Amino acid sequence: MPSREAIIDAPASEAAAAQHHASHPGTSNLGDRLFNSTLWILGAMILVVAGLIVLNLAVAARPLAKDHSLWGFITETQWDPVEDRFGALTFLYGTLVTSMVSLILAVPVAIGLSLFITQFAPPKLGRVLTMPVELLAAIPSVVYGLWGLFIVVPWLRASVEPWLGKHLGWIPLFQGPPIGLGYLASSMILAVMILPTIVAVSVEVMKTTPEATREAALALGATKWEAVMMTVIPYSRAGIVGAVLLGLGRALGETMAVTMVIGNSPQISASLFAAGYSLPAVIANEFAEATSSVHVAALAGLGLILFATTFLLNAGARVLVNAVQRGPRRVSG
Amino acid sequence: MNLHSSFTYRKVVDRGMALVCALFFALAFIPLLSVLWLVISKGAAGLSWSFFTQLPKPVGEVGGGVGNALLGTLFMVGLACLIGLPLGVGAGVFLAEKGDGTVGRSVRFMAEVLSGVPSIVVGIVAYALVVIPMGHFSAIAGGVALAILMIPTLARATEELVRVVPASLREASLALGVANWRTSIRVVIRTAMSGIVTACLLAVARAAGETAPLLFTALNNQYWNTDPRQPTASLTVAIFNYAISPYDDWHAKAWTAALVLLIVVGLLNIASRVLTRSRLKGAR
Amino acid sequence: MKKLMMGLLLVAGSSASAGGLLINGAGATFPFPIYSKWFNEYNRLHPDIKFNYQSIGSGGGIKQFTDGTVDFGASDAPMKDDQIAKVPDVVHIPTVLGADVVAYNAPGVTGLRFSPATLANIFLGKVARWNDPAIAADNPGLKLPDQTITVARRSDGSGTTYIFTDYLSKISPEWKDKVGSGTSVNWPVGLGGKGNEGVTGIVKSTPWAIGYVELIYAIQQKLPMADLKNKSGSWVKPSLESTTAAAAGVQIPDDYRVSITNPDGKDAYPISGFTYLLVHRDAKDKAKGTAIINFLRWAITDGQGLATALDYAPLPKPVQQKVLKTVETLTVQGTRLSAK
């Protein structure tokens, strides 16, 4: 942009302008330039941070490439520090199972909750109601882990798992001894932890539904619920999917709470009662104490997989959410 | 099917679904109340002066406190702020001021995506970046990890807050002949300042609650430590270690430490809320 | 905010110098109770010297010592030759003896005992129920419930695991073939707990669980421990005496890297081992090196008195003499430290 100073100075004689610049030798220009370049550097820091993450993970994981192919690493189930043979499959499995089950538990609740806040509750109440959801998001994950370990796990062991085993035991998901620690415990705690993420984004997205569309549906004689199903849901569908993906990203990467309740047992089991292991949990448990360089590299490799997965998920989710949020501005504008 | 019954049916569905949504709300409330109630009821008994001022006792001996962990958390969050706040806020101002080009858009997208990176991954990065070159675990490594976590979220929050400053304010300043950069700093950023402080408070609250990135960066320390080059205890790692131990005394300490952590995080959240509210009032 | 930071920095600057000497160590959880007692006691005697010890597991102790991230390491597993090749100046200093016990949580069942084969099969997952004929054969007359056994074992690199798997490899060819011995192994079954603390926690809170932990962890938590059948065929209770008996009959090599699992001797408990501090033969840092040597002198002599109170077996007298001689060969910046 041409300097506004120049426009203001225009009526003055050139000499005066020269004098002015001589007495303040380019303060504003220099200031602008300094300010601008500082801003650019600070903005670039975000990209630098991203670069640092990728670079450091790749360097740390490199020794793994010597005797493990990527495909071999992902499909191998052995995790054998004695023989230096490492495979990620059991951890991938545990991470996927716990995340999926937590989504199954959390998504219906989250969408219902978001609809309640945005559509059914009076607007004032809706604003108050977001408070407890934000509180859920503010609780540190280690506190969830503590709660999970001492409250949820014993409850699952004593009541929920025996009950499920008795009544639904014919499904492989609910077979085996009720230990408490395991996939089910992790999934339940993850469900609580990702709920606020999904709700927060869903609420934002649902709010962008043009009021006129919904009112039109109501005017045509639709009930409130029908109006929601006809307008709010289709309008914000992509954004809700994005919200769910963000929640999934959080579930995949959650470390402490899962480490404390999943049982840390590298095995693939059909039963939700069984103990398992997840990508973040194995990194948390073994990284500081892995002895061989291949072991460290394998853990860094798990970190790289985790990073790549959550990166892609978040990127996809952002594209969806941004598209929906930008939508109404275009419509109304 | 006659119209009347179908209308009743539709009415019932409408009421029913509204009720289901309300029930889901109640369902989401249960874990929140359970966590808060248990942390308070199990943690409150352990609160005492010595809990905040003493060092942990050797294994198996009852008593002692987590003063070193409390200090360690403050210390590392402080270090993280030194690095993370300027960079995060700065990147946010960049996004608000220059964020409309291709570079700006990609930076914004990257910040959004990075804010979802699992904290354990950042722990590995800080280990490779700081612990290995320095040769040992340290508070600074923990601080760097927390700072990396802070930057993207803070950048996005700051951008939002700087962007809500009315364009008319900026234009008025420019029209008075104030240079671009002075306008940005004196008018725009100053107006957004209370909002930026809010964002910083939330970033600090989040950092204080992180555990995973500290496990193999700051490690732990049984003593008071304020040397950034030395391993350092933190409240969150203490909760983790105490929770998975077999000692009843340590379990009790984990609950009390969790209560302290929740109070700290809660106060920061409340402070940010109060700031936001007063700002909104001011704007009206 | 700015003021707060300045304050923090000031605090950082001032107390770093006033804090005295901080020596960092990390490793085994097996001796953590005695080490934390020792370091606490030593700090009381020498307030200017602080040992910060983190019990992250023997595997971690070896790694962090090798990487140079700590001033000393601790491990229950002697370092392997290829590990020593990376830090050739490492010296193993045995500090105390400990025993791995098989702790269980079986409501209503007490006085369990296991033969070597049964024990191996439980951890191989082949004996999976409490009323398995193999357990019944070891425990005639004991009423065993029809419940699934939940095996608990370490999730981290651990010397306790090393001692346990070293024993299982000696008595079970199948174990040796399938799993082997090491600080962390590829477990056929089991819940993973972090540290002896974690495994004890799982056994304590999970009915029908069984796991291996250091003696003191089981005693402190009042968990029942199984008697084991030793090499000479007699049933032995885990105790200080039976642990000391295990070390008595073993020839100790000069680098102390020796396995004492499955020893001869009628009263010897079969799963025990030395636990070591790992130090450099020559310390680069004068103050730290001096402090470490002085601490070792104290730990091997006066410190031994604290061991029995925490259910560790002190070093047998001849071993103690030998270790003291080794400590005197350690140097600081190339020179030996004169005895006080």
Image (cartoon, coloured by chain):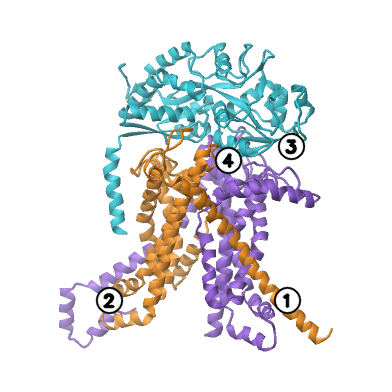
Q: Amino acid at mark 4?
A: Lys
* Distance from Cα at disc 4 to Cα at disc 1: 61 Å
Residue at x 23% of width, y 86% of height? A10
Label 3 packing within 10 angstroms: few (<14), some (14-19), many (20+): some
* Distance from Cα at disc 3 to Cα at disc 1: 47 Å
Q: Amino acid at mark 3?
A: Thr
SS at mark 3 in the image: loop
SS at mark 2 in the image: loop
Tell me whether the residue at label 3 lies in contact with that at label 1, contact meaning CB atoms closer than 8 angstroms.
no
The chain coloured purple is A
Pointer 2: what residue?
B179
Q: Amino acid at mark 1?
A: Val
Question: Mark 4 or mark 3: which is in front?
Answer: 3
Q: Is residue B14 above or below residue C136?
A: below
Residue at x 61% of width, y 32% of height? A82
Q: Same chain for the residues at labels 2 and 1, yes or no? A: yes
Residue A109 position in % (x across, y down): 64, 65
Residue B63 position in % (x across, y down): 43, 37
Pointer 1: what residue?
B13
Residue C212 position in % (x across, y down): 62, 30
* Distance from Cα at disc 2 to Cα at disc 1: 62 Å
What colour has chain C? cyan
Is residue B211 visible in the rendered image? The answer is no
Q: Amino acid at mark 2?
A: Ala
Pointer 3: what residue?
C148
Pointer 4: what residue?
A66
